[in-house]
Image (cartoon, coloured by chain):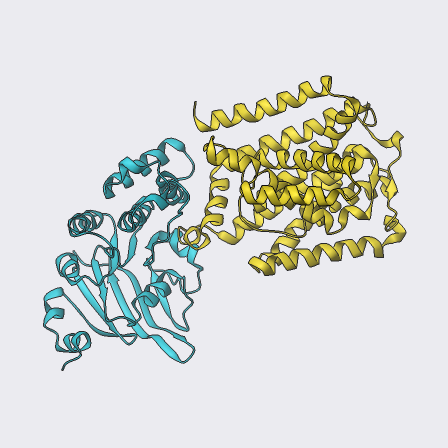
Chain colours: A cyan, B yellow
Amino acid sequence: MASVTLLSTKGLSRSFGGIRAVENVDFELPEGQIRALIGPNGAGKSTFVGLLCGRIAASSGSVRFMDRDISHLPAHRRIALGMAYTFQITSVFARLSLYENVALAARRSIGSDRASVDREVASALERVGLTERTDQPAEDLSYGHQRLLEIAMGIAQHPKLLILDEPTQGLADSEIRQFNALVRELNAEATILLIEHNMDVVMEIADAITVLNFGEVLAEGPPEEIRQNRAVQAAYLGTG
Amino acid sequence: MRPEAKSLALHLGLLALLVIAQFVVSPFHHGNLSRIMVLAVFAIGYNVLFGYVGLLSLGHALFFSAGMYGMGLAMQHLGVSALAAIAVGVFSAFVLSAVVGAVALRTTGVAFMIVTLMLAQAGYLAILYFGAYTRGDEGFVIQPEFRTIAGLDLTDPTVRYFAAFFVLAACLLLTLRLVHSSFGRVLVAIRENEERARMLGYDVFRHKLIAVIISGTLSGAAGAVYGLLFGYVGATFATVQYSILPLLWVLLGGAGTVIGPFIGTLFMFYLIDFSSGLTSAYMVVAGVVLVLLTLFAPQGLAGEVKRRLLPWLP
């Protein structure tokens, strides 16, 4: 299958004051891939995905999504085009029920028809294993479960591109195994861009890896190649 | 019963009580209730923005008085009928709230409070400045012979009561519908976590702007009806006091509940009435009660009931 580019950036940059958080990044993400974005702390990973979905304005450069220049669209318009974003620091509607959290995500695309929303919410919560807690307020969940709720909110939007910012943070080992399976399942419908620190997760599920360091792309390729890459090892381990 | 059905039953029950009250209460309370019902519409309008979107405006006197003066000036200077004058008042508030919203929503938090406060002060000063038309501080009386709609004499206490009741019922049921709609739920989402709502793909600015317009227009409707039913249009209603009052009513009654604004208005009205019977320093008594309520029922009366007993209360 010839791969179609779903998302690409050209010369994407962002500085905060004098600090270049993201510097001149050319990036291409083919449709259907699971791509991991890795790099040491402060490498600019979160800033980069923030630029993709419009949470952060770019200093220069452009973003294309589904063959369309979206550089000037505000965040909500980009999301409406088919991106979904889960926050690094859990950001759910704490005082609302799990049902309502997911329903808010679902209604934007499927409208207010109650039966379809119910169905969508039930299916998304089931996929992350939170069905029994549908009516509880989100603030009652443990941190790890709130991460799963975030993912359910992503699922309910039926995105073409699902951006997960450190989704396994705070999950137990058994939950991480479930998570890996879930991501593979979701990959049937969506392209996935994953920021992840847990290298076991990355090596297991990613089709390809992009390594950022000091805001620039240091390396890109399949997991095995990245594992062998000396520059990557140096960036991570501080040895040459 | 589904939560929506329960809440509809509750609110219809309140409206039924108000219908019964018309036949049983003394003339004194009867007159009070008419006023309270119209002022509660003002509070309901305020609550759409404050209770459901979480935006604290200090300028709603502007919308209330826009409705009142739109109605009054149209009758006084253009000689239109009462019903048409109400429409002019409501439309004035609609336009003004769209403009104020477009300007003030560029700010958030304290800045939003200050901008709305300043715009409302500008409105108050404009009323004084154009004294040739508005009769400034003094205001003007709407003569009883003009206060009729479809042959109904609005100076008659019973007609007035039912006119107030009709407006309250319409606004109450309208907001009930609003908060159960997907639009209303997005407003709550914005109140709870604006950034998350944006990142679910909702146009936060547009939703807030529409909320300001609904809120301002309802407040304007209250102002127009109040001026017509009680026959007086005056600059007092544009002062900062009338921006603070709906905030107090809503806080006392329970922000973010549909029934709260009415309860708060009723409670505050009688609190002041009762305490002014005790002492000339009645605001001290009122103040103490308000402090106690804030300490022991910070969610307001209906908010407290919602928290303890009826979690489905919308």
Number of residue marks: 0
Q: Can residue B314 be seen in this view?
A: no
Q: Position of residue A228 (x, y in %)?
A: 9, 72
Please identify the quadrant where the N terminus of chain A is shown: bottom left
Query: Measuring 34% from the left and 60% from the top, which residue is drawn there?
Result: A65
Q: In this view, does A173 lie to the left or right of B231?
A: left
Query: Measuring 68% from the left and 48% from the top, which residue is drawn there?
Result: B244
Query: Measuring 35% from the left and 52% from the top, which residue is drawn there?
Result: A82
**Up-down relation of residue A64 to residue A16 (above or below):** above
The image quadrant of residue A14 is bottom left
Query: Measuring 37% from the left and 60% from the top, which residue is drawn there?
Result: A53
Nearest the viewer among A221 and A196 is A196
Q: Where is residue A156 in the image (x, y as percent from the top left)?
A: 32, 44
Q: Position of residue B303 (x, y in %)?
A: 53, 37
Q: Where is residue B68 in the image (x, y as percent from the top left)?
A: 77, 42
The image quadrant of residue B10 is top right
Q: In this view, does B225 lie to the left or right of A154?
A: right
Q: Is residue A233 visible?
A: yes
Please identify the quadrant where the C terminus of chain A is shown: bottom left
The image quadrant of residue A103 is top left
**Up-down relation of residue B109 to residue A96 (above or below):** below
**Up-down relation of residue A153 to residue B85 (above or below):** below
View extreme (bottom): residue: A240
